[in-house]
């Protein structure tokens, strides 16, 4: 986006939201924080009275007599626009996702008191029934994200022994995610984990997340963090893609569902593609039964075979 467009977006955002700090403006404009002061100078040169407030809670604000009035959207109307944007981004069949996102941001940026950043990232179709306790924990984590304060979790990992006591986690929540597909349907909190000094993801669940509370420890979100670096195409957790080759009974098998990226036909009824979530891939292969066979790599075929043998051993007496 060119400099003039960014200056206009900054002007519209300040008119709609009042006093805004440099970091928030940089996030909204998707630019370096150092550019904000230069944009302010250009707007002042153009005749707009941009006030600069010094101090910890300072920032920039536009004189109320300048420009044009903001859109008068209600809270529910603003929420509907923001949620519709997130919902449509989770549906690959909607081809105008990028254009709709740009349009929704323009609408939200010209509406007062819009919290564009504090939204749940919807990666799937919303269909999650939460218990009262889960709703409370989700609300606390949303508040922690909004206030930029650390949350204290008491958490038990998925494969942890239920006899073992759950452990404490200090988490700076960067994103609240709804991940929904045929194999999973839940809310997650992703952010910086103090205990291990890296980015981790935690499921908001009565079984795993025993408790959640706000702390008075503030945090600054890592400016290099981007959700797309941590989330895969078909998996909540991003893995290095594996190039897989399969033999299929007919080409229709490949067209029935999404298998991976960079699909290429090697020969008749033989295809290769990149898989970023082997667990989902194994489930798809199992669903197709004898209509598909894993040819390579060998370790993937062997792991799938081991999984099948483990399942068969459970039903030996039934066969």
Image (tube, rainbow, N blue to C red):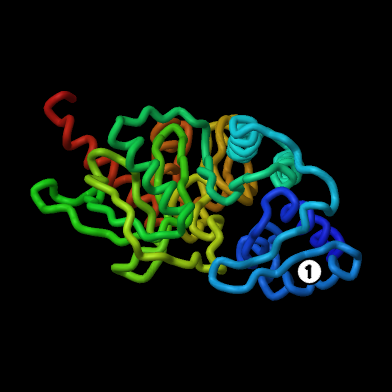
| Front residue of 262 and 161 | 161
141 horizontally vs 241: left or right: left
From the viewer's perspective, tell me whether residue 256 is left or right of residue 30.
Answer: left
User: Is residue 238 at least partly visible in the picture?
Assistant: no
Q: Residue at x 63, y 45 (%)?
A: 113
Q: Give the side of residue 13 with respect to residue 157, left or right.
A: right
Q: Which residue is mark 1?
A: 40
Q: Residue at x 28, y 44 (%)?
A: 307
Q: Is residue 262 visible?
A: yes
Asked where in the image residue 57 lies, by quadrant, the reply is: bottom right
Quadrant that contains the C terminus: top left
Q: Residue 312, how many percent across, how many down?
A: 22, 35
Residue 24 coordinates in the image, percent (x, y): 62, 61
Residue 255: give x, y in percent of width and height: 61, 33
Q: Residues within 10 Å of mark 1 (few under 14, many from 20)?
A: many
Q: Which residue lies most toward the right here?
A: 46
168 and 19: which is toward the camera: 19
**Furthest-left residue in this view:** 163
Q: Secondary structure at mark 1?
A: helix
Residue at x-position 28% and y-position 35%: 133
Residue 143: % across, % down: 43, 48
Marks counted in the figure total 1
Instruction: Please identify the quadrant where the N terminus is shown.
Output: bottom right
Q: Between residues 205 and 119, which one lies in front from this camera angle?
A: 119
Q: Residue furthest top?
A: 318
The image shows residue 222, relative to residue 190, as above or below, that is below
């Amino acid at each position: 986006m060119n400099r003039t467009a960014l200056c206009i977006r900054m002007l519209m955002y300040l008119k709609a939201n009042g006093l805004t700090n440099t970091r928030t403006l940089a996030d909204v404009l998707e630019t370096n924080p150092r550019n904000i002061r230069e944009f302010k100078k250009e707007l002042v040169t153009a005749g707009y009275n941009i006030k600069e407030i010094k101090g910890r809670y300072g920032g920039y604000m536009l004189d109320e007599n300048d420009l044009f009035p903001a859109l008068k959207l209600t809270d529910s109307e603003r929420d509907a626009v923001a949620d519709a944007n997130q919902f449509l981004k989770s549906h690959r069949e909607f081809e105008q996702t990028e254009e709709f996102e740009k349009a929704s941001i323009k609408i939200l940026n010209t509406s007062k008191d819009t919290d564009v950043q504090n939204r749940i990232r919807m990666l799937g179709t919303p269909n999650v029934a939460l218990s009262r306790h889960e709703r409370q924990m989700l609300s606390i984590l949303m508040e922690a994200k909004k206030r930029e304060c650390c949350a204290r979790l008491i958490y038990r990992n998925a494969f942890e022994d239920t006899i073992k006591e759950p452990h404490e986690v200090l988490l700076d929540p960067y994103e609240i995610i709804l991940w929904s597909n045929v194999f999973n349907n839940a809310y997650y909190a992703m952010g910086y984990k103090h205990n291990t000094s890296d980015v981790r993801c935690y499921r908001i669940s009565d079984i795993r997340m025993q408790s959640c509370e706000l702390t008075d420890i503030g945090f600054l979100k890592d400016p290099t963090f981007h959700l797309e670096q941590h989330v895969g195409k078909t998996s909540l957790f991003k893995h290095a893609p594996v190039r897989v080759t399969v033999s299929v009974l007919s080409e229709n098998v490949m067209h029935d569902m999404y298998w991976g990226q960079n699909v290429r036909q090697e020969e008749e009824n033989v295809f290769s593609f990149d898989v970023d979530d082997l667990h989902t891939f194994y489930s798809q292969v199992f669903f197709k039964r004898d209509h598909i066979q894993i040819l390579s790599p060998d370790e993937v075929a062997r792991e799938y075979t081991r999984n099948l043998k483990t399942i068969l051993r459970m039903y030996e007496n039934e066969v």
